[in-house]
Every structure is written in C-alpha cells, then in structure tokens.
Image: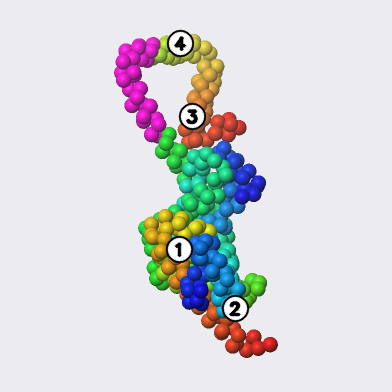
Amino acid sequence: MECRECLGLISEYVDDELPEEWVSDLENHLEGCPACRASERELRDLRREIRGAVESLVPPRGLEERIISSLWVSERKVRQVRTVWTALLLTSLFCPFFLLLSPIFAMFLNLAYVSTEALWRTGFTLLESAPAPLSLSLGVAGLLVMGLGGYLVRRLLRDIPANEVFS
Amino acid sequence: MTDKDLEIVLRCRSGNQEAFTDFVLHYTPYVYRTAVAFLHDRVEAEDLTQEIFLKVHRSLSQLHDIRAFPAWFKRLITNACLDQLKKKPPLPTAELNLDRAAPTGAEQWETRLILREALAELSLEQRQVLLLREWQGYEYREIAELMGIPLGTVKSRLFSARAHLKNVLEEETDVRSSSPGHDC
C-alpha cells in the first residue's frame, strides 16, 4: 500500500469503519511507515482535542434554574389548555343528555327556588319577631358568614390549594 | 449509563417533579454543550436546551425500555439541533462569545479556544458531520441516515473537516514553537 492510499483511508480506520479486507494491509503499512503512523496519531489526538474543546464549554450561571422554572410554567399552561378542552369535550358529549333531562332539571331548579324562598321568608319572619338587638346581631353575623363564603370561593377559583385557603 | 442515571430516569418516568429537577441539573451541561457546538450561538443554544428538556418531560413516559434511554436521549438532542439548523441556519458572522479567560492550563485552554474557532469556520455540513461522529459518536451509516446524505458524502465531509482542523492545529503548534516563550 502506498502512503497516499493509506492517508486516504486513515480517517475511516481511526473510526473503525474501514472494511475488514483493507485493515490488515493498512496496519502492515502503518507498521513500516513512521509518517503515516504520525498521521494516525494526529487524528486520534484531534478527536480527543475536539471532545475537550466541546467539554470546555461552560453553561451560563443559573441556566438549570431557568430551565426548571420555564418548564413548570409551560407544563402548567399545557395542563390548563388540556383542562379547558376536556371540559368542552365533556360538555359537548353530555349536551344531548342535558337536553333530554332538562324538564327534570327545571323541576329541581324550581324546587330549589321555592325552598330557598321559603327559607328566606322564615328567616326574615324570625328576625322581625325577635327583639331588636338580637335580630341586628344575627343579621350582621349572617352578612359576615356570606362575605367569608364569597372570599373562600374566590380563592378556590384562583387555583389556590384548599389546605392553604383554610389555613 | 450509571446506576444513579438509571434511578433518576426511572423516578422521572413516574412523574416525580423533584426527580426531573435532578435530571435537569445532571444533564444540562451535556445538552447545552451539544447545542452550542452545533449552533455556535449561545443564546439560541440556551433556548434549544430548554426546548429539549420540555420534549423529554413530555415524552419520557412513552419510552418503554429504560435501557434504550441513552440512545433515545442522544437522538432527541441530535434531531433537535439538526432541525434548528434547518429552520434557522447560523449567520456566517455568528459570534460564539467564547470564554476567553483562561482559568487553569493556559496552553490547553488556548488550544481548545482555537479549535472551537476552527470548528466555527467549517462549513455547516462539515461541522454537523464532524460533531455527529466525534462528539455524539454516531457510525457513518447512522450519520448518513440522520442527515439524508450518501455514505460517501459522510466520509468526504469528515475527511475535509479533519484536514482543516489538523492544519489549524499544526499552524498553532508552529506559532507556539517559534514564539520566544517556547525556546527553552
């Protein structure tokens, strides 16, 4: 094998990609040719140097933290979009059933309305018949309870975990 | 793949957030280095690193055989880099903003700096093939498949890229040996 031919094949030899039938010829030539052996060594050194050059690249400070935070933000968005789509899909799937059962729902709604109205009336009648200070304090307490309920519902709707809402 | 890597990946697959944080901390340097080596743009490499971890997070549960993780992960990173290059080829004047401060081993640091600059001078195709072989460790056949080029083209690009880098390093060695600091 000539040096020129050998130099053309060294690259493949170093990569273990040279066909078997060429390997022994090339190795024989390398044994007897210091110049080609030096080229082979240079190529192996070059590989080490390239790896070293890439490994010496230092990630900027805080990159990991930025990746992690952006990942959770993005995952949260994906989850929200998925929830909305699931809700829409379920609604569209159950729409025919809702329509079919709408008279029953209307009946229940009416019942709820009637019973709530009755409760209000009873409450007001009791408040009116009670002594003035007691009726006033009960009214204020009722308003406070309603306000607190509204606040808790609002916090829950803002995606705050229930244990934090009640803590 | 060490036992620790395996454990992290297994915990990640079960949707453990803490495990994925460990995963990001463990693999960010490798992913970032690969992205910078391919793109030669630190800002884009940062964005791509984020995208890669997002893809891993979304698709890791689909990986059935845990032993296939290293090859799967390497392929995912490589495809992301190659796709990014297809979408937005780097400008010829793109700056790598190399770290020019030499912390230790000044001579070796300088060689690496020169080599990174030489890598940036290669044509995009030559650099891709060279990095796929030398950094990612792919076989010629796999490189041909990844890039959609004939095997002969892989060989010739690799040969030219190496010849260029060898010349650059030889020139650097000549400069060093002729400089006054190396007379002793």
1 vs 2, front mark: 2
Do dots 1 and 3 share one subunit?
A: no
Residue name at image x 60 percent, y 40 percent: B11
Q: CA distance from mark 1 to mark 3?
A: 59 Å
Residue A58 quadrant: bottom right
1 vs 4, front mark: 1
Specify the amino acid type for callout 1.
Answer: Val
Specify the amino acid type for callout 4.
Answer: Thr
Percent from the top left, x then y, of residue B116?
52, 70
Residue name at image x 38 percent, y 27 percent: A90
**Image: A29 above or below A89:** below
User: Label 1, on which residue?
Assistant: B129
User: Label 2, on which residue?
Assistant: A34
Secondary structure type for disc 4: helix
Nearer to us in this view, B58 or A95? B58
Residue B119 can be seen, yes or no: no
Category of crowding for the residue at label 2, using alpha-carbon neighbours closer than 10 angstroms: few (below 14), some (14–19), many (at least 20): few
Nearer to us in this view, A46 or A78? A46
Q: Check if mark 1's residue and mark 2's residue have beta carbons within 8 Å.
A: no
User: Label 4, on which residue?
Assistant: A122
- Report the colour scheme: rainbow
Specify the amino acid type for callout 3.
Answer: Val
Percent from the top left, x then y, of residue B112?
57, 72
Secondary structure type for disc 2: helix
Q: CA distance from mark 4 to mark 3?
A: 26 Å
Category of crowding for the residue at label 3, using alpha-carbon neighbours closer than 10 angstroms: few (below 14), some (14–19), many (at least 20): few
Q: Magenta residues, as a range?
A: A84-111
Percent from the top left, x then y, of residue A64?
56, 54
Do dots 1 and 4 share one subunit?
A: no
Q: CA distance from mark 1 to mark 4?
A: 84 Å
Q: Check if mark 1's residue and mark 4's residue have beta carbons within 8 Å.
A: no
User: Label 3, on which residue?
Assistant: A153
